[in-house]
Image (cartoon, helix red, strand yellow):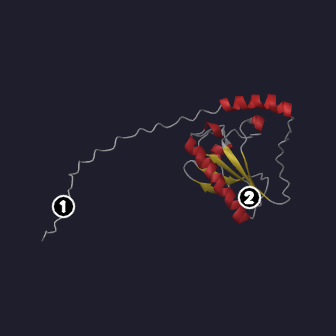
Amino acid sequence: MSDNNCVFCLIGSNRIQSAKIYEDDDVVAFLDIRPASEGHVKVISKQHAPLISMLDVNVRNKIFNTALNIGSGMVSKLGAAGVSYLINEGAGAGQRVPHAGIQVIPRYEGDNVNINLNEKEYNQEEINTYLQSVIKKLQSSIPEKKEKIIEKKPEPEKPEQEEVVVEERVPKYW
C-alpha cells in the first residue's frame, strides 16, 4: 500500500521519475538527488511504512540484501574505498522522509562525508552503573529465542533376522 503524499511511494510506483538502479515487486533502489558522495543510493520498500522496523521481515530482508549487493558493487565497480549503510528511524534520528529504507553511501578518500557519532568514553564508575542499566533495558527489548523442541521419532522396528548357523560341510574321511 502506498501513500499519495509520500515522495518515496511516488518513486516506487513510477509516478515520479528517478534514476533507478534496481527494482522488484517489493524494493526499489535509486540514486539520491542530493548525494553525500558519488553513487549515493537509497534502497526503499515499495510498501509504505515510516520505519524499517515496521516492515514485514521478508521485505526488510530484501532491502538489506539489496543494500549489501549495491555496496559490494560500489567497491568493485565504482572504486569506493568502503561503504556506509545509514538507517535513520524517526525525525529525532535525522529521517527527513517518513518512509522505510537504507541509504548506501560509497566512501572515497577525502570525500568529506561526515557521519559524526560524538563518541564518549566512560570511566569505570559509569560503566558499572549507567551502562549496566542501559544493557538491562536493551536486553529486555530483545525477544527470547525459543528453543526448538525436536521430537525423536521412534525408529522403525527392524524385522527379526533368522539366526544363521554356519556348519562345516567338509566330509570326514578318517
Residue 132 occupies quadrant? top right
Identify the residue position indicated by label 1 in the image. 167
Task: Tell me the kind of residue under disc 2.
Answer: Gly
Q: Quadrant of the C terminus?
A: bottom left
Q: Name the mark on residue 39.
A: 2
Q: Is residue 159 above or below residue 137?
A: below
- Residue 13 visible from this viewpoint: no
Assign the N terminus to one quadrant of the image.
top right
Q: Residue 158: percent from the left, percent from the top?
A: 27, 47
Residue in the image at 80% along x and 30% along y: 128
Name the mark nearer the viewer: 2 or 1.
Answer: 1
Along the line of sight, the residue nearer the viewer: 96 or 152 = 152
Query: 88 and 140: which one is in front?
Result: 140
The secondary structure type at the circle numbered 2 is loop
- Compared to residue 169, the image places residue 129 above or below, namely above
Which disc is residue 102 wearing? none
Alpha-carbon neighbours of circle 1 within 10 Å: few (<14), some, or many (≥20)? few
- Relative image position of residue 152 (x, y in whole percent): 40, 40
Residue appearing at x 77%, y 53% in the figure? 35
Three-letter code for the amino acid on which mark 1 is drawn? Glu
Q: Earlier in the sequence, mark 2 or mark 1?
A: 2
Would you say 25 lies left or right of 163 here? right
